[in-house]
Image (cartoon, rainbow, N blue to C red):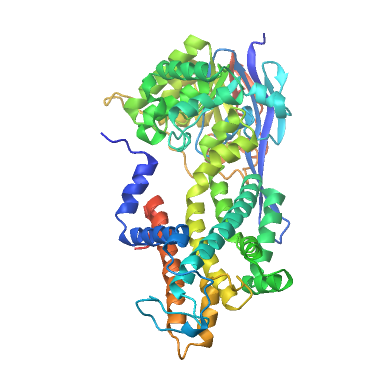
Amino acid sequence: MERETPGRLFWHRFRRNRLAITGAMIVILLFFFAALAPYISPYDIGDINTKNALQAPSRDHLLGTDQLGRDVLSRMIWGSRISLLVGFVAVGIAIVIGTFLGALAGFYGKWVDNVIMRFVDIMLCFPTFFLILAVIAILEPNIWNIMIVIGVTSWMGVTRLVRAEFLSLKERDFVRAASATGAKNSRIIFLHILPNALSPIWVSATLGVAAAILTESALSFLGIGVQPPTPSWGNILTAGKDNIEIAWWLSLYPGLAILITVLGYNLLGEGIRDAIDPRLTAS
Amino acid sequence: MHDNLVVLNNLKKYFFIKEGFFSGKETVVKAVDGVNLKIKRGEILGLVGESGCGKSTAGRLLIKLEEPSGGEIYFDGEDITASNGERMRKLRREMQIIFQDPYSSLNPRKTVGKIIEEPFIIHKIGNRKERKERVKCLLELVGLRPEYTDRYPHEFSGGQRQRIGIARALSLNPKLIIADEPVSALDVSIQAQVINLLQKLQEDFNLTYLFIAHDLSVVEYVSDRVAVMYLGRIVELSDSRELYKNPQHPYTEALLSAVPVPDPTLKKKRIILEGDPPSPITPPSGCHFHTRCRYKTEVCREEYPVFKEVTAGHFVACHLRV
């Protein structure tokens, strides 16, 4: 008989959720594109050929060409690298900050909790997007600054989640048992509470990637994100906006790419949540 | 060697609840309000009382899982009330706790082997191989198969989980074990097995138990002496057999009359306590029990009775017993 480990149970429930599987496939496909960009993109992304500018999709250029005659498909494949990179690094930063502060607030309580949670409230008061705009306007708008800025403005939700988990887990008897055997606080936090608090963190991370990709696209679209000639879905869209009446493909395809990617991550995130705890599923 | 392994002197635990963010007012919950108790080396002391009377809190205070608000705790002759840090970590090897709910007392993400091994790692005992050996011994000791080390808690039944909790508590060879309602969450058929295991271990390792429970028949069966707690204080303490034969406090009397007797022909007079136990936020004046007592007099309303010895080894806090 197969033993029921938590992992197997998770997979069993996840597999039955078609939307979640669709989301997972989209995400895997994107990873595939990003990893194999140099091998699968049909043209060099720097290949400027103004004679070829704004070509409609054809057999030579499946998704057409942009205002400088560059192949849109190739640029989008390379752009997926940017999206993934920004998504993961920004969320990584947010998760690390959020988990650390949330754990401190939930575990130690009292004034530590008060200080951290009021700081969260303050951060939540800023309209995040304008904060990012302001910071990027001061700093140099390169991809690393964008990732850092998105990361340090999106950790508050994680903090609240982790704090709530810690508040309930620290009252559980297995945590009391650990302190009764003389475990130090660091051991209790990292080996007893944190592993049990991970599931909401995974969900929030997956959903966070989608949000970060969206933010990056918006910034690049506004011209303060990833700077041309480096291709990003956002800055391809900018070019599309200027030529929307004569070259619809320049707006449609990167737009679709963003839509499908964000949808994919959201479906995956919700799938993970439902598989971890079926009781949370809205009927 | 001290005869008394544990001495509690006027032990108190108050919880403060803020009424609101802006009002500075605080409500005080007197969960444990001046408990005096001596636990003799090698005995099983039962601690009984209704839910919310503070018996679990008292147990947790004793092993310093909570900081007392007042009073003193002596363990093996040493005042441990203010002990912390390294000293307390050393002391933790001597005192362990078994919890009521076997579903919450084991970390769901760790294998049974890891759970039982952890105390050795914390106190840096043995190397990997020795630790694994001892985990297997402990599993056998509590009646589980040593091959179970790689399994997760959710693969076990309640009774088996409780045995795992017992194995963990025993791992460091403690002197004192707080058994906080160790069988209340188990099926009756399993209760007997776990109680017998606890008794056997007590004899084999010369352990001392503080056995917290609300089931009087269980407590009568296991305990050498029994303490009855009501609203944060001990109201009666006596040898187990004596207490059941000759209860002195009206509260104990009422509790005992509620114990089912396995004899359908025997008609027993039940004493029904009226009303709910009063809130520990606003305990009644005088004797805390007077609001539900059948024998109350004027003095009960005004003065808290002294906890005094009525016969040898039989203590009670009641104005009626002189």
| Residue B195, percent from left and from top | 41, 21
Left or right: where B44 falls relative to A137: left
- Give the residue displayed 57% in from the left and 19% down from the top: B176
Taking depth in this image into account, of A30 and B218 the one nearest to the observer is A30
Instruction: In this rendered view, identify the residue nearer to me: A264 or B97.
Output: A264
In-image side of A27 versus A110 (left or right): left
Q: Where is residue B236 in the image (x, y as percent from the top left)?
A: 57, 25
Residue at 50% in and 83% down: A240
Residue A28, given in percent of the width and then of the height, sits at: 40, 57
Does any portion of residue A282 appear in the rendered image?
A: yes
As drawn, is B22 to the left or to the right of A275? Answer: right
What is the number of callouts on the image?
0
- If the image is split into quadrants, where does the N terminus of chain B sit? top right
Report whether B23 appears left or right of B213: right
Q: Is residue A237 above or below residue B91?
A: below
Q: Which residue is drawn at 60% across and 78% down?
A: A222
Q: In this view, does A221 lie above or below B122?
A: below
Q: Residue at x 72, y 68 (%)?
A: A139
In the rendered image, the quadrant that contains the C terminus of chain B is top right
Report x, y in % for residue A91: 56, 58
